[in-house]
Image: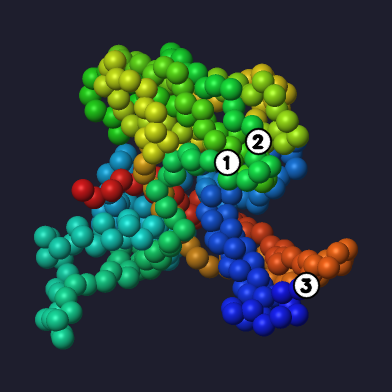
Amino acid sequence: MPATLVHPAHGDVIALENQNGILWLLERVENSLFTADSTLAFDGEAEQWDGLDALIDATSFVDLEGQPLQEADVEEASNLIVEAYGYPTDLFMGTRELSDLTKTMYPRERVNLPAPVNGTIGQAINAMSTQAGTIEFNPDVFIRRLPSPPAAASHGNAPVTPASIVGALNASAQGDFNKGVQAGPVEFAYAVTACNRFGESTAVISVANVAMPQANKDAGDHIDLTITNAAAIGAFPPEYFRVYRSIPLATGAPVPTLNTEFSLIMQVPAAFQGAGLLTVPADVNFLLPFTSIAYMGELTPQVITFRQLAPLMRLDLAVLAPAYRWMILLYGIPILFAPRKWLRMINIGRLV
């Protein structure tokens, strides 16, 4: 309130905070349209809607196994959508993935570059013709490579860091550890953070690597993980965990110690919130660390839409002190009517 009674250098402070709040909310919405998952709630009271990662049919994906995006991958993905009676129109991907796809065209001379005009060279790729039709490319700055653990807790009310994470081989033939991994025995290290609606804790790193011999890879074995809650939970218990993994390590390699050496591979709801209790997920090597995901599908109102109960608004709150309080509020939810008419392209690597 005092700031509204003077003439600050940056202008109207309420207008500035309105702008900041709107931009923050739109950033959260954009991220959530892709990655949100309503199942990441301990008691069923979800703090998130379902984004495309959760809405798209679990069997509808193309796995690039760590390779950069190629023209043939886009063609294959579009054909899979057609086989599900869809008509693919759009591909949403990270800006780096589109840049890598563009670079593959340079030596192949598939695009006739125009003569330089005023010293400008290069070619932007905005769409691709496939047997399923023309696919529009939509680079999105919020679609990033799978992240590393945060260096510090993202919020003061984030959960306490888990006590530990331990991995062990499970010979049940559910994994695919030959994917994206060099031949021969390898080892993996893990890290885990605890999350709730406020934010994410710091990470705890496994004290030992988990060995994966070649025979176990060939047999399709996977790794069972045991996450142990902190000895003292505090006022803000974990709702779910984010599990991070290292790149394949040589046999006998030391456990990595830097957060940047780990990348997200899965998110799992907490089985229990009590101190010292366990959550036991399985790593089947579905997502590879340090890769990214792209999304292709039929962008029509009959297939996918965003339903709004009310548009973006400002809602004033009660004045209880010499301070103005309000919120920027949006009531809405994405709906995917035909889960197989969209597809994920997973494990997209970087072009070196």
Residue 159: numbered disc: 2
Question: Label 1, on which residue?
Answer: 153
Q: Which amino acid does label 2 sit on?
A: Pro
Can you say whether 97 is above or below 171 in the image? Answer: below
Q: In which quarter of the image is residue 183?
A: top left
Name the residue located 30 percent from the left edge and 34 percent from the top edge.
180
Q: In the drawing, does residue 148 fall left or right of residue 231?
A: left
Q: Quadrant of residue 129?
A: bottom left
Which image quarter holds the N terminus? bottom right
Please tell me whether residue 144 is drawn above or below residue 141 in the rendered image.
above
Q: Position of residue 177 (x, y in %)?
A: 35, 26
- Residue at 31 percent of width and 28 percent of height: 248
Query: How many numbered marks does the figure carry?
Result: 3
User: Which mark is first along the chain, 2 or 3?
Assistant: 3
Disc 1 secondary structure class:
loop
Marks 3 and 2: which is nearer the front? 3
Q: Residue at x 15, y 63 (%)?
A: 106
